[in-house]
Image (cartoon, helix red, strand yellow):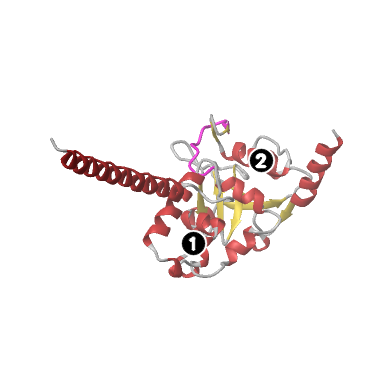
């Protein structure tokens, strides 16, 4: 084989290797882009249900042009409330009353409670691992969020001296709401989240969920509400932590 032929073959081989390298580089860039696209931005809500919100946000971003993104789509809290059915359709494009009310003193408590949506009901349960019953759920949320330790049973929580009895038309997010579901006053308890809705651990075979107090079943069983001084509880818990 002549030297000219060998040189020509070498040039062809080099060109082929270059093409392969370029293809490999392009594939690597595409994979990196995919990974980066699925990585949640700083500040995205995490926890048992944070992952689903992150996946939904990635899907929304891919499906809609950047110019069409609404305020709700940009706001993790708004999206979280929307996913859980706490924002009605007419409120999707603007800050809702519920969103505003949740972002008050009780915001940490209410949003913490929402992170447990879907945890199974277990009679006598008071943890994520074992499940929750109604009073086990409210006790866990109040202690975890604001450091206030409630009694174990629903009726005991309703009779706790440090809680203020309030009327139904005075309800604010973070208030405890009580119902007669077992032919006994204060036999069931949940946490009010705003706009007539509350979050609770309903019954055996179900899971922590949000329901509307205005539904006939709950409306006729409502027996009262109680309010804790959440700000004082949080400040007291912080002071105790610093003192130790």
Residue 60 lies in what quarter of the image? bottom left
* Residue 190 visible: no
Left/right of residue 75 with respect to residue 21 in the rendered view? right
* Closest to the observer, 188 or 20: 20
* Residue 235 belongs to the span the image colors magenta: no
User: Main structural element of the magenta stretch: helix, strand or loop?
Assistant: loop
Q: Residue 73 carries which label?
A: 1
Residue positioned 39% across, 64% down in the render: 64
* Residue 209 visible: yes
Residue 241 lies in what quarter of the image? top right
Residue positioned 84% across, 42% down in the render: 239
Q: Are marks 1 and 2 in contact (CB under 8 Å)?
A: no
**Residue 19: horizontal and vertical position, in percent?**
27, 46
- Element at label 1: helix
Left/right of residue 6 with respect to residue 69 in the rendered view? left
Nearer to us: label 1 or label 2: 1
Q: Which mark is residue 101?
A: none
Disc nearer the start of the sequence (1/2): 1
Binning the other alpha carbons within 10 Å of mark 1 as few (below 14), some (14 to 19) or many (20 upward) gives some
Q: Name the residue under label 2.
A: 155
**Residue 109: horizontal and vertical position, in percent?**
65, 48
Quadrant location of the C terminus in the rendered image: top right
Magenta stretch in the rendered image: 116-126
**Residue 22: horizontal and vertical position, in percent?**
32, 47
Quadrant location of the N terminus in the rendered image: top left
Binning the other alpha carbons within 10 Å of mark 2 as few (below 14), some (14 to 19) or many (20 upward) gives some
Residue positioned 49% across, 39% down in the render: 203
- Residue at the extreme right of the image, as rendered: 243
Residue positioned 68% across, 62% down in the render: 170
Residue 4 lies in what quarter of the image? top left
Q: How far apart are marks 1 and 2 (CA)?
A: 40 Å
* Closest to the observer, 29 or 75: 29
């Amino acid at each position: 084989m002549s030297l000219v032929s060998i040189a020509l073959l070498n040039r062809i081989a080099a060109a082929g290797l270059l093409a392969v390298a370029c293809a490999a580089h392009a594939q690597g860039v595409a994979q990196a882009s995919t990974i980066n696209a699925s990585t949640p931005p700083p500040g995205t809500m995490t926890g048992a249900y944070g992952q689903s919100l992150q996946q939904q946000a990635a899907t929304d971003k891919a499906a809609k042009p950047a110019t069409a993104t609404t305020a709700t789509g940009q706001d993790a809290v708004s999206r979280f409330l929307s996913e859980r059915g706490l924002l009605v359709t007419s409120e999707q494009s603007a800050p809702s009353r519920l969103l505003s009310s949740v972002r008050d003193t009780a915001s940490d408590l209410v949003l913490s409670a929402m992170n447990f949506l879907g945890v199974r009901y277990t009679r006598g349960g008071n943890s994520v691992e074992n499940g929750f019953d109604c009073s086990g759920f409210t006790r866990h949320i109040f202690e975890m969020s604001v450091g206030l330790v409630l009694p174990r049973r629903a009726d005991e929580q309703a009779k706790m001296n440090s809680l203020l009895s309030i009327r139904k038309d005075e309800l604010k997010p973070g208030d405890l709401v009580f119902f007669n579901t077992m032919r006994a006053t204060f036999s069931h308890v949940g946490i009010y989240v705003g706009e007539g809705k509350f979050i609770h651990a309903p019954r055996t075979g179900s899971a922590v969920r949000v329901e509307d107090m205005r539904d006939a079943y709950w409306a006729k069983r409502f027996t009262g509400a109680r309010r804790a001084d959440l700000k004082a509880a949080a400040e007291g818990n912080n002071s105790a932590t610093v003192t130790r």
